[in-house]
Image (spheres, rainbow, N blue to C red):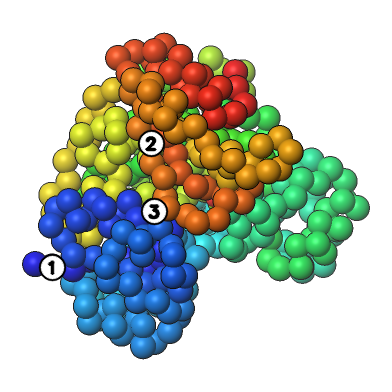
Amino acid sequence: PCTLGVLGGGQLGRMFVQAAQRLGYACAVLEPESHSPAALACPQHIQTDYADPQGLAQLAQRCDAITTEFENVPAEALHWLAQQRPVAPSAAAVALAQDRIAEKAHFSACAPLSGVGPAPYAVIETEADLHAVPVTLLPGILKTARLGYDGKGQQRVHTPAELQAAWQQLGQVPCVLERLLTLQEELSVLVARGRDGQMVHYPPQRNLHRDGILALTQACPGRLAAGLAERAVAASRLIAAQLGYVGVLCIEFFVIDDGSAEGALVLNEMAPRPHNSGHYTLDACDVSQFDLQVRTLAGLPLVAPRQHSPALMLNLLGELWFDAQGQPRSPDWAAVLALPGAHLHLYGKHEARPGRKMGHLTLTGPTPEQVHATARAAAAILGIAPWP
Ligand code: ATP
Ligand code: MG
Ligand code: MG
């Protein structure tokens, strides 16, 4: 008889609520939108702005512990809530992940111990910073320090003139310029850490992005060089521990060619919550990333998750709801669900827009080969472009 609260009403909040409900918890969602995925799954919806003091007071009153499902809630809201109730992750950890400048500084500070640093970068806050940028950072990607996601708030630049134009276009807000790296692949690691410091993790999964948005995640442990996987896990655990982090944390890595057989790891960014690349854990693991989020919040024991099946996750983006002429259509879910090992998750969003995350599809099976074959069949049915 305990209520868990979540700030934010997106799909991550929805899957958190569903995991909490399975364990018998009541939930409350604070979210301004009326038809949000989490609010649809939760009878207690406080429909107001994330910074509304009355709404926050109501959430604190109703809930025994509170979490967030996206990193752009005002850190002050979490800070205020934390004075009333246990809040995880902390306002400080979320504030760090909200700001690429602070985030990269933390990564750099951990680098001597973690053995992994961020891509070469420069902070750009003023005209003078812009002119002082070393040419070795070009070509590069200019990223706003705050509020970017799914590749929004980013521009690729090749020359100092393009860099200047891009900074103007992004509104001259604080940014980081990162060198554009040639990526061998992208990985992410999910760790969960409890208030007592106990920590568990999933093995790294491999991610394919298209136009800055996650398109698919492959979770076939054993397919990744063992040394690389170990180093990514060790660095992720260290970063979480150094933050005194409580909750589920996702760390994104690049793998670049450094002449070695395995390649070198570079830190990209972190998310202070369950992550899109961990959605496969719902269907392929005995404990999902949302189960672990509930456990860290409620102070329950953490157990090392076991993956019982190789898996591949395909994101279902809004463009699948339109045909080649741009006319609305309904994807053929029946054909997809006829595939053995297909697990469909739709988030209940009313309006499809290109690039909008409407749901995901996880394919599981006895072998990685079989999972890939099923995923290719599903992609062909849905009109998702094939991958290498
Ligand atoms: P998310 O939705 O994951 O929060 P985001 O908008 O914060 O995304 P990033 O993770 O910074 O964006 O970048 C999105 C993608 O762009 C990366 O996953 C990678 O594919 C590519 N990318 C970003 N930075 C670099 C870089 N320095 N070199 C090469 N590719 C990059
Ligand atoms: Mg990001
Ligand atoms: Mg990212």
The amino acid pointed to by label 2 is: Leu
The image position of residue 295, as x and y in percent, is: 19, 53
Q: In this view, does 385 lie above or below 347?
A: above
Residue pictured at 60% horizontal, 63% vertical: 146
Q: Position of residue 174 (x, y in %)?
A: 68, 66
Task: Give the CA separation, mark 1 to mark 3.
Answer: 20 Å
- Provide the residue designation for mark 3: 12
Q: Confirm whether residue 253 shows in the render.
A: no
Labels 2 and 1: the sequence-earlier one: 1
Where residue 98 appears, as percent x and y from the top left, is: 51, 62
Residue 364, quarter of picture = top left
Q: Which residue lies furthest to the bottom in this view?
A: 54
Q: Can residue 153 be seen in this view?
A: yes
Helix, strand or loop for disc 2: strand
Which comes sooner in the sequence, label 1 or label 3?
A: 1
Judged from this view, the residue extending furthest toward the right is 161
Pointer 1 residue: 2
* Disc on the earlier residue, 3 or 2: 3
Q: Callout 3, which amino acid?
A: Leu
Q: Is mark 1 on a helix, strand or loop?
A: loop
Q: Label 2, on which residue?
A: 344
Looking at the image, which is closer to me, 248 or 177? 248
> In the picture shown, does residue 257 fall above or below 79?
above
Residue 249, position in %: x, y?
37, 50
Spatial CA distance of label 3 from label 2 is 15 Å
**Toward the viewer: 258 or 301?**
301
Q: Which corner quadrant of the figure contains ligand 1? A: top right
